[in-house]
Image (cartoon, grey):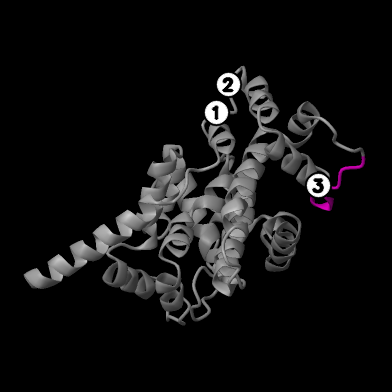
């Protein structure tokens, strides 16, 4: 293998260091939402722990009740209390909603450019498909994993601004070429940036794994969180929600158990994604 000239190594290191400094300036993740991420749903005290977190954060509670009473969940009776919301929606869904609300804060407080909306909608689309795959394969918290899988790209947009957005808004043949260009221009790709953001914010390891490896082939066990998020990401891209502006790719071949699910028909997926974006994605 031919090694790059020393000057190229130095240039890459300088770009990497500059991007690290930029990412380090991201503000902390929402503290209450972070606590939700780090509480096991299987804990005997999980319900009480969740309720205590919301009681200490009225703004997050207001957002939760607003979403819980939206048409997305088809609730007939008004959900007016934290405990009612937790029992009606379930802890896993509440955790995903808390994460969505917290991330949407970053999106809402940035210039709402076309590409920021583009990345956000890809994240919601991947989360929506991941949740379906999670039910099929009995994997928990897949919505949250899908929602944050591309957080490195959002972090790069929010910290590097136009330097990143202008470049990444160009059409590329495929995601692999885009990632190569990212490393050349910024010293790291968005997956590596995602790991940095996940570590900075104290995300659980399973979420960090999905962030660093969602484009890495043959990562993790079959039917595991990383592989299911990888599949959801590719499915989202193929039906009109790509993470970058790239040439269309065919709908991926689904594994056996997923092939039998009517929920994964393209039209049903699209309809659910649009409903999700309409209710909580903007």
Residue 104: x %, y % from top left: 62, 53
Q: Is residue 264 left or right of residue 147?
A: right
The relative height of residue 19 versus residue 73 in the rendered view (above or below) is: below
Q: Which mark is residue 39?
A: 1
Q: Is residue 271 or residue 63 the one in the foreground? A: 63
**Residue topped by disc 3:** 73
Q: Which mark is residue 43?
A: 2
The relative height of residue 86 versus residue 210 in the rendered view (above or below) is: above
* Within-10-Å neighbours for mark 2: few <14, some 14–19, many 20+: few
| Quadrant the N terminus occupies | bottom left
Residue 122: x %, y % from top left: 57, 64
Element at badge 3? Answer: helix
Q: Is residue 134 left or right of residue 60?
A: left
* Marks 1 & 2, CB-CB < 8 Å contact: yes
Q: Which mark is residue 217?
A: none
Report the span colored magenta: 70-76
> How many angstroms separate mark 1 from mark 2 (CA)?
8 Å
Residue 56: x %, y % from top left: 66, 27
> How many angstroms separate mark 1 from mark 3 (CA)?
24 Å
Identify the residue at image location x=52%, y=51%: 148
Q: Is residue 46 or residue 21 the one in the foreground? A: 21
> How many angstroms separate mark 2 from mark 3 (CA)?
25 Å
| Quadrant the C terminus occupies | bottom right
The relative height of residue 152 versus residue 134 in the rendered view (above or below) is: below
* Marks 1 & 3, CB-CB < 8 Å contact: no
Which of the 4 image quadrants contains residue 124? bottom right
């Amino acid at each position: 293998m031919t090694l790059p000239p020393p000057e190229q190594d130095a240039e890459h290191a300088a770009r990497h260091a500059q991007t690290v400094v930029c990412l380090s300036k991201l503000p902390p993740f929402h503290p209450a939402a972070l606590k939700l991420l780090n509480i096991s749903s299987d804990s005997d005290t999980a319900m009480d722990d969740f309720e205590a977190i919301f009681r200490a954060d009225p703004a997050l509670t207001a957002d939760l009740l607003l979403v819980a009473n939206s048409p997305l969940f088809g609730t007939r009776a008004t959900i007016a209390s934290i405990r009612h919301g937790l029992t009606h929606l379930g802890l896993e869904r509440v955790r995903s909603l808390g994460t969505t609300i917290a991330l949407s804060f970053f999106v809402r407080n940035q210039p709402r450019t076309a590409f920021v909306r583009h990345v956000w909608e890809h994240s919601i689309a991947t989360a929506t498909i991941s949740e379906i795959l999670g039910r099929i394969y009995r994997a928990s918290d897949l919505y949250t994993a899908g929602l944050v899988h591309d957080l490195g790209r959002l972090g790069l947009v929010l910290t590097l601004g136009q330097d990143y957005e202008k470049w990444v808004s160009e059409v590329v043949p495929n995601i692999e070429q885009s990632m190569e260009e990212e490393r050349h221009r910024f010293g790291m790709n968005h997956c590596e940036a995602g790991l940095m953001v996940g570590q900075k914010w104290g995300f659980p390891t399973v979420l960090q794994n999905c962030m660093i490896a969602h484009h890495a082939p043959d990562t993790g066990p079959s039917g595991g969180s990383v592989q299911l998020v990888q599949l959801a990401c590719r499915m989202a891209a193929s039906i009109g929600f790509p993470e970058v502006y790239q040439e269309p790719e065919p709908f991926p071949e689904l594994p056996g158990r997923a092939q039998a699910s009517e929920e994964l028909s393209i039209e049903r997926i699209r309809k659910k994604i649009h409903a999700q974006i309409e209710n909580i994605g903007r």
